[in-house]
Amino acid sequence: MPILYYRDPADEQWKQLNERGPTGPVGPTGPQGATGDTGPTGPTGATGLTGLTGPTGPTGTKGNTGGTGATGPTGPKGATGSTGAQGPTGPRGQTGNTGAQGPTGADGDASDRWRMARGSTYVAGGSGTYKTASAGYGFNYASTPDAVCTGNTTVMGQTVKGVSIDTLNTSSITCCVLRTNSTGTYVDWVSWGVVY
């Protein structure tokens, strides 16, 4: 029962008219009210402990090749190399001018003891090696004669690199040829000396 109040006209104060009755039984729970708005986010908590290291992941794919780097500085000068082998012989030079006429020789020996022999001897080609061939005078000199020879060919200084006298004695002459191929060469020679 609720408490009732009245106004006392004697002092114009509100006064209790009755006593509060005993509390009645608890009534049934009313329906749940609507959910209130979400409150503000609370402060961030303290950092937790670091967890254990996880297993290594698989190898990633190969990245693209990077751009070419800048050119490095020039290195120091290397040591001087050894001298190379001598190059091949150059081509034969042009024929020089005709020399001045020599002085008149001494008077000759009018006797018949002087003899001259001449010939043309074939020397096989050596393909880069020296080859020789001999020829007799047809008689014997009393002592070793004088002699000269030359190659009877249009390729002197080209495939024929040289012609010379190899040996010379009182009965024969041996000519020597250096040729780059296997073709043979005729060598013209002449000798002169005394026979007694």
Image (tube, rainbow, N blue to C red):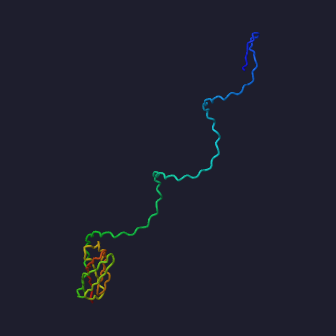
- Tell me what residue is drawn at x 32 percent, y 76 percent: 127
- Tell me what residue is drawn at x 30 percent, y 81 percent: 175
Instruction: List the single residue furthest toward the top.
Output: 10
Q: Is residue 92 above or below residue 165?
A: above
Quadrant in the picture for the N terminus:
top right
Quadrant in the picture for the C terminus:
bottom left
Q: In the image, 89: left or right of 74?
A: left
Q: In the image, 189: left or right of 65?
A: left
Give the image location of residue 172, x and y in percent: 29, 85
Q: Is residue 10 above or below residue 78?
A: above
3 or 147: nearer the viewer: 3
Give the image quarter of residue 150.
Answer: bottom left
Number of marks in picture: 0
Give the image quarter of residue 37.
Answer: top right
Give the image location of residue 62, x and y in percent: 49, 53
Give the image location of residue 2, x and y in percent: 72, 20
Give the image quarter of residue 143.
Answer: bottom left
Q: Is residue 80 above or below residue 126?
A: above
Q: In the image, 110: left or right of 55?
A: left
Give the image location of residue 57, x and y in percent: 55, 52
143 or 101: nearer the viewer: 143
